[in-house]
Image (tube, rainbow, N blue to C red):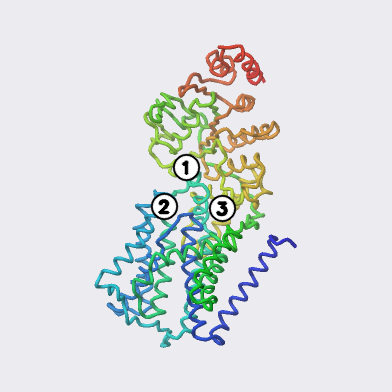
């Protein structure tokens, strides 16, 4: 049996779970207080690693100041106990609330930043929290806060190493369940889509800023939860426990184990929390040995010791017999759906689009053609909010666009594909489609996490629609395959299925036939007609004249950023200005190339 066989991996995971559970029960009975104390540290690293994994592993946001949330949870519990005489359990809700608010405070103004800039800001936030704790009288300054009472449950004081170890495991199991439900929710899929391709995620309906902010809030919640446990464990806290080095340690746990992998994070916690203690016999050399070991492990396993795996089991209902339904199917064909007036877009001194005006009627297939660099894709980008027009007006269903974020445009009923395929390659085919559908999935996040019956029912309907979309584009059998592993033509069709998941009234297809062979192009023509039959109006950018002339009701022609012709396909074929724009007539070489191009026009 191959090492990567899913059955073997599942069996290994089950054995690991049984071994860990047995160790959790047996360890307090046979181990010394020192060993139990190390185990508590490992469990704490696991909790904080799982929280940071939400931010770094799922959403792909580099956070170098995660210890700040850890500190906020710990200080909130300590202050509420010592100043207001709350019990430990009473401090948990406000501690989590303070941590969540801090996630909003750091996230909202900074999440428009990316990569190194975001990392620097989070690093600064972590240091600010530590410095504040070090300088305020209420936090005890450098001396910290002492006299934190241990948790009491049904009159029993949780203060010994064995009882704290049991409490830590309860906390870990709660965080495990919470993060597992989050990762399987539509929010979890949105995080991964942002990590894979933020621009594509926004363009198919994911509100990226809000989703990234939620990643910080959820990560902060777990960090605050771990901080409360930390305060209960020691009965005293001071700023030295929440340094930049702690943030880096939590990050090592995530990266070493495998970003986005919950088993990997737990394995990373065992190594980071336990290996330095196991190397204690090396005395002063143990930190050096630990560092060398980390370097070697990362060279051998750059994706982590237990990298995240794509779930091959696809939970798509087999007994769902519903039909695809789109809002446009009930609307009157022929009415104006989209109106573009004097659209212009400048890039510095370059006028990419100049005074373009046209209308799109409901129920038609409209093609936009023109030489490379004519401004066709720029028009699509202006329509979908990817870029803002420099001038002009865009009206969709009577509402003025042009300054809307892409996800709001999608919610209104206008979806798109890209000239270059922009799938989420490390997600399965069905996960890609679900991300496109999720903005219309109205189940609350709380309902999904709690697994309420209404949430399970709506999720089943959601999955049924996903199955029908994959079936519509001919990819039902590929539902569980990694999108990046699909053949090129299948990737094109999957991108169309993902765009249809947003239930659009108008679908913009940007060169969908690019790179396809003749057989695939013929099938694509049938697919485009089928989309129109579902009630979805189609606007198509394409260079393949056979496809354009075969499916279009009307054709617009652009050249050098302007609209030079519009009409039915037959009229466009005879238009001298269009022929000049495509073929040219300056040289004999142009005439030769033009003859070859003309054959396509006549086909």
Left/right of residue 343 with respect to residue 267 in the rendered view: left
Disc assigned to residue 210: 2
- Residue 500 position, x and y percent, is 56, 42
- Residue 466 position, x and y percent, is 59, 49
Which one is earlier in the sequence, the residue at label 2 or at label 3? 2
Q: Which residue lies furthest to the left in this view?
A: 137
Element type at marker 2? helix
Give the spatial CA distance, label 1 vs label 3.
18 Å
- Residue 381 position, x and y percent, is 46, 35
- Residue 199 position, x and y percent, is 48, 44
Few, some or many residues within 10 Å of mark 2 (<14, 14–19, 20+):
few
Work out whether residue 417 or residue 401 is closer to the camera in this orientation and state it: 417
Disc assigned to residue 462: 3
Which one is earlier in the sequence, the residue at label 1 or at label 3? 1
What residue lies at 55% left-to-right and 76% top-to-bottom? 278
Which of the image's four quarters has the C terminus? top right
* Residue depth check, mark 1 versus mark 3: number of the one nearer the observer: 1
Element type at marker 1? helix
Disc assigned to residue 410: 1
Few, some or many residues within 10 Å of mark 1 (<14, 14–19, 20+):
many
């Amino acid at each position: 049996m191959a090492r990567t066989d899913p059955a073997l991996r599942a069996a290994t995971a089950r054995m690991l779970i049984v071994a860990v559970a047995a160790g959790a029960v047996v360890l307090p009975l046979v181990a010394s207080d020192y060993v139990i104390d190390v185990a508590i540290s490992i469990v704490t690293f696991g909790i904080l690693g799982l929280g940071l994994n939400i931010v770094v592993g799922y959403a792909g946001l580099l956070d170098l100041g995660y210890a700040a949330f850890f500190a906020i949870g710990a200080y909130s519990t300590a202050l509420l106990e010592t100043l207001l005489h709350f019990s430990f359990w009473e401090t948990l809700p406000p501690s989590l609330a303070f941590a969540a608010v801090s996630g909003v405070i750091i996230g909202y103004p900074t999440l428009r930043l990316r990569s190194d800039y975001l990392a620097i800001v989070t690093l600064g936030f972590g240091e600010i929290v530590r410095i504040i704790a070090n300088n305020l009288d209420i936090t005890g300054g450098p001396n910290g806060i002492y006299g934190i009472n241990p948790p009491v449950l049904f009159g029993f004081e949780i203060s010994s190493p064995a009882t704290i170890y049991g409490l830590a495991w309860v906390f870990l199991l709660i965080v495990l369940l919470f993060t597992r439900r989050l990762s399987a929710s539509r929010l979890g899929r949105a995080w991964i889509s942002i990590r894979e391709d933020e621009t594509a995620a926004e363009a198919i309906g994911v509100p990226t800023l809000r989703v990234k902010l939620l990643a910080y809030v959820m990560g902060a919640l777990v960090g605050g939860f771990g901080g409360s446990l930390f305060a209960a464990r020691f009965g005293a806290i001071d700023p030295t426990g929440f340094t930049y080095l702690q943030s880096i340690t939590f990050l090592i746990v995530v990266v070493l184990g495998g970003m986005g992998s919950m088993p990997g994070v737990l394995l990373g916690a065992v190594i980071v929390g336990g290996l330095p203690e196991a190397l204690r016999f090396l005395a002063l050399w143990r930190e050096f040995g630990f560092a060398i070991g980390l370097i070697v492990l990362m060279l051998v396993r750059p994706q982590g010791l237990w990298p995240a795996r794509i779930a091959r089991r696809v939970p798509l209902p087999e007994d769902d017999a519903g039909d695809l339904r789109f809002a446009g199917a009930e609307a009157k064909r022929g009415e104006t759906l989209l109106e573009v007036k004097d659209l212009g877009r400048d890039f510095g001194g370059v006028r990419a689009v100049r005074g373009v005006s046209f209308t799109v009627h409901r129920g038609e297939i409209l093609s936009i053609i023109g030489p490379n660099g004519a401004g066709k894709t720029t028009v699509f980008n202006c329509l979908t909010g990817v870029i803002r027009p420099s001038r002009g007006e865009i009206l969709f269903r009577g509402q003025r666009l042009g300054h809307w974020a892409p996800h709001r445009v999608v919610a209104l009923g206008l979806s798109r594909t890209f000239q270059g395929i922009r799938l989420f390659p490390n997600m399965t085919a069905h996960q890609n489609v679900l991300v496109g559908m999720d903005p219309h999935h109205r189940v609350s996040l709380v309902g999904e996490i709690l697994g309420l019956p209404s949430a399970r029912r709506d999720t089943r309907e959601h999955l049924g629609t996903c199955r029908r979309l994959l079936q519509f584009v001919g990819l039902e059998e590929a539902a569980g395959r990694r999108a990046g592993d699909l053949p090129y033509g299948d990737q094109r069709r999957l991108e169309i299925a993902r765009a249809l998941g947003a239930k659009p009234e108008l679908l913009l297809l940007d060169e969908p036939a690019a790179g396809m062979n003749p057989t695939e192009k013929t099938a694509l023509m049938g697919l485009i007609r089928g989309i129109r039959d579902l009630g979805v109006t189609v606007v198509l950018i394409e260079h393949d004249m056979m496809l354009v002339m075969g499916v279009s009701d009307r054709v617009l022609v652009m050249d050098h950023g302007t609209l030079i012709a519009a009409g039915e396909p037959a009229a466009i074929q005879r238009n001298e200005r269009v022929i000049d724009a495509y073929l040219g007539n300056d040289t004999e070489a142009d005439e030769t190339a033009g003859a070859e191009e003309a054959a396509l026009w006549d086909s």
